Amino acid sequence: MWKTRSITMFLCLIAFVFSGAGQAAAADEPLSLQVLINEALINNHDILAAETKWKAATYRIGQATSLPDPMVMIGYQNEGWDKYTYGAMQGAQWMYSLSQTFPFPGKRGLKGEMAAQDAQSNEAIYQAQRQRTIAAVKQLYYDLFLAYKNLELIGAKTMLFSRIEDAALARYSSGMAGQQEVLMAQTEKYMLLEKETMQRQKLRSLEAMLTAEVGREGDVPLGKPSEPAPAAFSFSMEELQEMAGRRSPEILSRERMVDAAEARVGMATKEYFPDVTLAASVFKRSGPYEDMWSVTATFNIPLYFGTKQKAVAESLSLSTGARHELVAERVMVSSGVKDNYFMLKAAEKLMSLYKTGLIPKTEQDFELALSGYATGKVEAITVISRLKALLDFETLYWGQFVEREKAVARLEAIAGISDAGTAVKTNDKN
């Protein structure tokens, strides 16, 4: 019994160790942006909901263009009240009738056009949701990368502050400086530890948001993002505006809504005209009486003309509103292109300034100040301020790098040139 329990505990221990090692290995694997995008396109619930609405809208097209259900009538006509007179009286008969209503020419086509435009609008909304999700995943991925990068910068600068602390201790032990300089260096190092704690909390929040965006369930470690290469983006403002006007799924959706609204105006106008119901009847008689048959056509009378005029006015108002919404969407898309394009260009200029000017000069200045401090030529506050400036510039550089990548992601979504834009391009009107 003791041996059995020991073996069981040993196997459980092995399983636990290998399980932990597997999770650690998964967490250590570089986090791939494309894998996250593919996962989000499959599992994101907003995308799935938009897709089901689009599919449901396509099912309504056939329903809108079909004829009304035919009507079957079965009845009996009797002469007199006191007895069953079928076969004995001429007017006694069984009646069978089949009727079909045919809408006025053009009505079914307009209904089908309305349903088709609604379906295309829902398809554009679905494509827009795909692009928004891709952009959201990219932005969260870049923010997560920045959080890890800031942790790396904090770790590197903590080591540099340790060098300042060592120099201050050496000067203090030799009587060249007071204890205040040692405390100053130690305080700055502990403040970096505080920033590290806050950055790790931000990192966990970003991981949670990214996990939710890709539709992943459970607490599965994401891993560390690899340093992304700058996204190639050579479009001009004019090219982006032109592409956004043709490919933006939001604009495409609004255009389909305008077309559907115009079809509704035509449908409301067609309601002035009557539908026709054709019926074929057979009257079954018995005895010496021959069977009879009849064919009839029934028309509804557009008697309530005034009420139908209000329906046309309503449709015209909705059509005008849809056109205003389309113009507003175009203005919003154009504004979004300009805003993100200028943000991208500003980030590129700042990155160049930090990388080629401020960071190398500040790093050189810090090394000179640290050497001077060791020999007593420079004060501690000067060395610390140089190091803090170096940390700030490096942090700002990577912050602008991420802002550039996020602006590119948003522009790709707005202009319909991201991975989800493939299906949208097939609907280009030009």
Image (cartoon, rainbow, N blue to C red):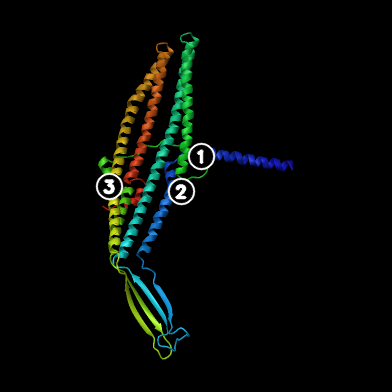
Q: Amino acid at mark 1?
A: Pro
Q: Residues within 10 Å of mark 3 (few under 14, many from 20)?
A: some
Q: Residue at x 33, y 41 (%)?
A: 411
Residue at label 3? 327
Along the viewing direction, whichever of 338 and 287 lies nearer the viewer? 287
Image quadrant where residue 291 sits: bottom left
Along the viewing direction, whichever of 75 and 195 lies nearer the viewer? 75
Q: Residue at x 37, y 68 (%)?
A: 68
Q: Secondary structure at mark 1?
A: loop
In the depicted structure, whether residue 391 falls above or below residue 307: above
Q: Position of residue 184 (x, y in %)?
A: 46, 17
Q: Residue at x 43, y 77 (%)?
A: 74
Where does the N terminus fall, quadrant-wise? top right
Q: Secondary structure at mark 3?
A: helix
Q: Residue at x 69, y 42 (%)?
A: 7
Q: How far is the residue under mark 1 from the one under mark 2?
A: 17 Å
Q: Position of residue 374 (x, y in %)?
A: 43, 13
Q: Are marks 3 and 2 in contact (CB under 8 Å)?
A: no
Image quadrant where residue 19 sits: top right
In the picture provided, is 404 more to the left or to the right than 226? left
Q: Is residue 11 visible?
A: yes
Q: Earlier in the sequence, mark 1 or mark 2?
A: 2
Q: Position of residue 183 (x, y in %)?
A: 48, 16
Q: Position of residue 378 (x, y in %)?
A: 40, 13
Along the viewing direction, whichever of 376 and 313 lies nearer the viewer? 313
Residue at label 1? 221
Res 43 label: 2
- View extreme (bottom): residue: 288
Res 312 label: none
Q: Secondary structure at mark 2?
A: helix
